[in-house]
Amino acid sequence: MRILHVGKYYYPHLGGIETVTRDLSEGLVAHGHDVTVLCYSEDGRSDKETINGVHVERMSHMGVLASQPLSLSFVKRLIEIANDFDVIHLHSPNPLAELALGIMKLRGILVTTYHCDVVRQKWLLPFYRPFLKRALNKSQRIVAATQYHVEYSHTLKDYAHKCDIIPFGIREDALILNEQGQQLLEDNKNRFGSFLLFVGRLVPYKGLHILFEAMQHIEQKLVIVGRGPEKPALMAYAKELGIDDRIEFLGRVEDSNEFASLLHGCELLVLPSIDKSEAFGMSMVEAMACGKPVVSTSLESGVRFVNADGETGLQVPPNNAKLLAHAIGKLLSDDLMRSKMGKAARLRFESQFQSAEMINSYLALFESLSEQQKINDLRQVS
């Protein structure tokens, strides 16, 4: 099959959606399929390249408004090539892609993976919702990563009859410690001592300001992996709270050995997100793959599915620094509980969040829809 993934960005841009798109694309290539990714360029300039067998087209844009790159070239290119593919896989939300796919007549199969509701840009919904609904109406199937995505979404409730649940998975190979990783693990122990880990973009919905308030009651260091526009404000807030000596901003960690050593070396991972923009929490899956428990918030999203409360970690209400500190302290003070939950986290990763299982599930869906389309085409001919 010829498969087109339509997303916002692609590797080496790091993010949950981008990780899913990369692993799925490369997995489909490994199964013998011809895979192209159409997305926007981070630097605003168009380019084409092939990465591990995946053809990547990045389109130029004029700027970004409300997290949406503004690109007429993207819309034009999508309309030009969409009907060259057997399957179009749309990663939503992506307003310009939904606009283009909504107005054109498609010959192939359209599958939409619905990652999250639009939360922070609600003022755009009156303009955006018609495009989104047209794309969802055209989609033969809609994929969500958890049942909570469907139950708590204002949009997907109307499409529950054609939703499939396929949990996102990750490749474990990059998280296995080799000899260099083992040395980095020791270096981290000497550098940080006992530490907590946060992985993610430094943006408001991640709730780092709440975690900083909780850190006033925690002795360990907090290591932060990620970059984003909130860094200056977060550094200032850490200093204001008097905890700046225990906060380590590492920025984006691109070396897989270094990243794996941080996951294996931490006591636990914290995901303090405060709204449904955090729809899944891929960093939790990465920590669980390394046998680490998680403290997260009980958002009305897939986050509460990933971290099983009381089993693989603890959940607390969002925007509550006191309860967040209590949950972190509870795990830090109980070695047996932390170890037990870490082992359970590893088992949950193995049973729910393997990349191979995700790829096989998507492939089975694509093949099933392709066979059904062939049957429908034959009926029309006869």
Image (cartoon, grey):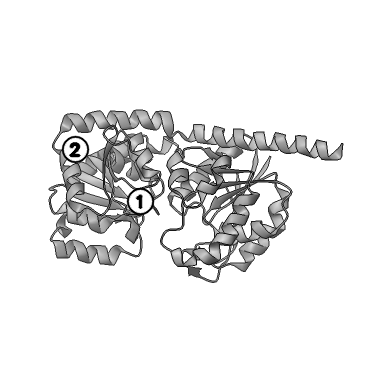
Element at label 1: loop
Kind of residue sitting beneath label 2: Leu
Crowd around label 2: few <14 · some 14–19 · many ≥20 (10 Å): many
Residue at position x 54%, y 50% in the image: 91
Q: Nearer the viewer, mark 2 or mark 1?
A: 2
x and y percentages locating residue 287 in the rendered image? 33, 39
x and y percentages locating residue 32 in the rendered image? 64, 35
Which mark sits nearer the N-terminus, 2 or 1? 1
Say the numbered circle drawn on residue 148.
none
Instruction: Decide which of 39, 131 is in the foreground and name it.
Output: 131
Residue at position x 25%, y 63% in the image: 234
Compared across the picture, whether 321 is left or right of 25 comes to left
Say the numbered circle drawn on residue 331.
2
Label 2, label 1: how far apart the Cα atoms are:
26 Å
Crowd around label 1: few <14 · some 14–19 · many ≥20 (10 Å): some
Whether 183 is drawn above or below 101: the answer is: above
**CB under 8 Å between discs 2 and 1:** no
Kind of residue sitting beneath label 1: Val
x and y percentages locating residue 20 in the rendered image? 49, 44
Could one spot residue 292 in this view of the protein?
A: no
Name the residue tied to disc 1. 253
The quadrant in which residue 360 appears is: top right
